[in-house]
Each structure stands twice: as C-alpha cells, then as structure tokens.
Amino acid sequence: MKRLHFPLENKEILQELEAGELVWISGVLLAARDQTHRKLLSLLEEEAPLPVDFKGHCLYYVGPSPAPPGKIIGAAGPTTAYRMDAYTPKMLELGVVATMGKGKRGEKVREALRRYGAVYLATFGGAGAYLARCIKVCTVVAFAELGPEALFSLQVEDFPAVVINDTQGRDYYQEAQSYWERELKICKS
C-alpha cells in the first residue's frame, strides 16, 4: 500500500503503482464533474486563463452534496468516470497526473493515461458519507454558479483509492474479470 500526496512534485512515484494496489491519498484533490470540464475546455478554446494550474494534480469526479450543520462537506462519493472520458486526454495534456471516480474508462482514455504516464484511481461508490470524513477543507475554486458541479479544492487526509489503470497499461477491472471467469467460472458472457 502506497501513500500519495497531491499535487505531486515528482510523478515518478506513479511508475511504481500497480493495477489493483490500494493507495492512501493526502494533500489536495481538485474536484470536477461534467459542467466544470465543459467550462474549462471553453476557456481553452477562447485562449482565456484557467482558474488553476492542473500540473501534478488528481481530478476527483465528485459533486458533493451540501454540508449538513457542523460539517465541512456533505456526501462526497465518486461519479461514474466514463462521463468525463471526452475531456480526460486534454486534462492530462494540461498536467493532470491522476483521475479518480468509479467504473471503467474507455480505450482512448487508457491510451492517454499510458502516453502521459498518468493513472486512473477508483474510490468506493456508495460510501460518500465515509469519504467525506477524509475531507478536511472544501473550497470552491471556480464556477460557483454550478453548485455541486463547481470546481472544488478538497484538502484530504488518508483518502482511500484503488489503482485501476496504471502507467504500464494494466487494467485492474479487466484482470479481475478474467480471473473470475477463468478461476471462479463466474461472470461469463
């Protein structure tokens, strides 16, 4: 089990990660969903400045629910990652070194992850209240008008995730499914 601290100053640590490995994340996660991605790409097309430097960051696909009284944030469970597939190669080009959500990524994203030496992490769907306890500070960075789809900065401590796609091109979901089909004789089409 490895510990990652974002933003990464040196992304070589990503080369050491293997598909299926559990990681603990501390530092800052940038949180964004569909609407924020669309706005960011519009800014790029207009050659306008971006609200943050994405270099070394992990983008967490989450739209947190409102914070209950006395809490920093509401439930903060992951969004289905493939919804961001159209935007991911461009975000990697901007310096993002990891993305995190739930579910599989498409082939174009897996190719882009290999090309840029980045990883895709998954965290635990259905555990939004638990994951919120790992978030120590939540700040809207840009696009506040989008509500839960705004761009957030989340200061996290010991945030759990699993490496799904590593920098070598391995895909934990594919490997696990092959194992289940071969060894356990389940999930066959």
Image (cartoon, rainbow, N blue to C red):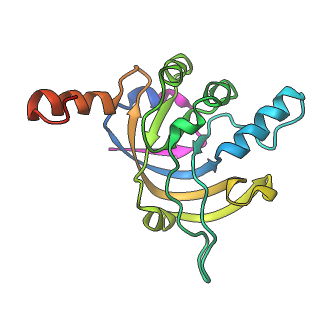
Position in image of residue 106 (x %, y %): 48, 26
Instruction: Name the side, left or right, on which 62 lies relative to 37.
Output: left
Total labels drawn: 0
* 72 drawn magenta: no
Q: Which residue: 52% across, 28% down?
A: 118
The segment highlighted magenta reads: 1-12
Indicate the position of residue 97 as horizontal and vertical percent values. Answer: 57, 32
Q: Residue furthest front?
A: 189
Q: Given the current orientation, which residue lies at the most extreme bottom position?
A: 69
Decide whether residue 11 is among the magenta residues: yes
Residue pictured at 17% horizontal, 34% vertical = 180
Residue at 44% x, 23% y is: 167
Quarter of the image for residue 139 reads bottom right
Rendered-image quadrant of the C terminus: top left
Vertical arrangement, residue 143 with respect to residue 96, above or below: below
* Residue 51, quarter of the rendered image: top right
Front-lying residue, 185 or 6: 185
User: Based on the displayed image, in which of its 4 quarters is residue 39 positioned?
Assistant: top right
On-image quarter of the N terminus: top left
Residue 68 in the image: above or below residue 48: below
Looking at the picture, how far across and down is residue 38, in whole percent? 74, 38
Residue 159's x, y, as percent? 46, 55
- Residue toward you, 108 or 6: 108
